[in-house]
Image (tube, helix red, strand yellow):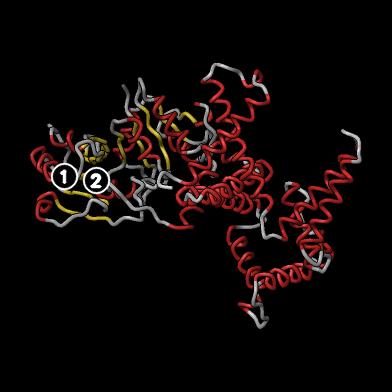
Amino acid sequence: MGTIAIVGLEQDASGVLDARAVRRLQAADVVLVPSPAGSSASLIASLGITPVSFGEVGLDERASTDQVVEVLLRQSQDRNVALAAFGYPFIREGLITGILARARRGVDLYPVVSPFQVLLLALDMDATADLEIIDAGSLASATRTRDAHLIVTGADNPILARAVAAQLRDRYAPDHTIVTAGSIEGGGFDLTPMTVEELAQIETVGRETAIYVPPTRIAPPGGFAELVRIIGLLRAPDGCPWDREQTHASLAPHLIEEAYEGAAAAESGDDAALADELGDVLLQVVLHAQIGAEDGTFTVDDVIAGIIAKIRRRHPHIFGTVNAETAEEVTRNWDAIKRVEKPHAGVLGEVPEALPSLMRAQKISRRAAGVGFEWEDIDGVWAKVHEEIDELKATGQGTPEAEEELGDLLFTVVNVARKMGIDAEAALRRTCFKFTGRFEHMEAAAAVSGRALEDLQPGEWEALWAEAKNKESAAERGPNE
């Protein structure tokens, strides 16, 4: 098993590289540099060392941190590898922690700085938590919280290190992962991941050893801002492959599906299910906004600003001087404002053609009624229903005329629903659920008797249907009725 070293190439005022860093580079079997023509490669070559570029090991110069970590781990399986770079210890975000998380062995850092600086600068600490720095001798009496980053300094010998572990056991699980930073021969520092329990059994430690203890729990930032941040991470170059591939068009079916599932949850009366489904709908909104932000077309702030302005504009009875005492007056005002906003669209032009036909019929009939194209009362609608039924009966089965008359009948029934204050889409959806439940009951009852549904006679179908209806009615009444 080989080793991994991160070697900084910063020079002193006279242009000389740290001698200990040079020795570590010379001891490596492979010295990796990002580019074969960069300043890192030139400096390494001037030391009489042949550098190996990222390209020679299958990496792009702009490879992600995860890709660099993967190559370092692979190259160090049977030899000593050094990554040489300027900017030490600000090498690359996530590099050190990525190695420690996956290698479960140490990584050496050169040139010399203090162990405290190594831990503070090399590890990617979550800025949402506090940082506590405590000397090993004072740890027992210090007031601490498990939700803060903790750096324990001065654990210079195994006795002190094990004493620190004893104190940590009171607040952290035995398998809680920590990182030790101790000086090593040759002038660098070795970062080694281990558990609290392993620290309690440690036999040797380097000089000036410091110990980093990450928080056990950091409450993430909450609310809408955190959702937006998370979606941004999913869409990032190193994020989720599925999320990165999505477009407005590919997400459209999911938006429709989630909206329908949200409507079903609202009708079910299950508040927990509704909250869950509304979250799924919101996820779709934020995903579209993130794609818009990446394309430079719009952001989630534009979405929010747009709907706020629209709500204010379409509620002049709240934010203006218009009077509206009833829901019907509000609806008329709303439709009138929309026609002013998009005068070219006409009364019905704004109703999306992509809507399901039943839902579109409702919107069309409501818009038409809103400008006065309406029956005087529901009796007129009923008369129209009977007229459409008679016209449908007069057509031949399967003919274009029959299709047209059936459409007329369905459209008129939608107007009946509107006149009665019923949402036709919701009513039909509930009937579909009801029919499905009854049919499944009949299917199960037939199976109990060992018969297939297609073998049942009309009278048996009627009996099973009545049985399903009675069972449904009993369930609705409850056990005490």
Label 2 CA crowd tier, 10 Å (few <14, some 14–19, many 20+): many
Say which residue appears at 54% left-offset and 20% top-offset.
447
Q: Quadrant of the N terminus?
A: top left
For this orientation, the residue located farthest to the left is 159
Say which residue appears at 28% left-offset and 33% top-offset.
106
Image position of 121 (left or right of 456): left
Q: From the viewer's perspective, is the residue at label 1 or at label 2 nearer?
A: 1
Q: Name the residue nearer the viewer: 116 or 394.
A: 394
- Secondary structure at badge 2 equals strand
Q: Please, what is the three-letter code of the amino acid marked with disc 2?
A: Val
Q: Name the residue nearer the viewer: 318 or 430.
A: 430
Residue 317 appears at what percent x and percent y? 64, 78
How many labels were placed on the picture? 2
Image position of 336 (left or right of 310): right
- Up the image or down, 293 lies above or below 10; here it is below
Label 1 CA crowd tier, 10 Å (few <14, some 14–19, many 20+): many
- Up the image or down, 358 lies above or below 396; here it is below
Residue 477 appears at what percent x and percent y? 48, 46
- Up the image or down, 323 lies above or below 206; here it is below
Say which residue appears at 42% left-offset and 33% top-offset.
69
Residue named by callout 2: 213
Image position of 399 (left or right of 217): right
Residue 73 appears at what percent x and percent y? 39, 28
- Secondary structure at badge 1 equals helix
Callout 1 touching callout 2 (CB < 8 Å): yes
Say which residue appears at 58% left-offset and 28% top-offset.
442
- Res 168 label: 1
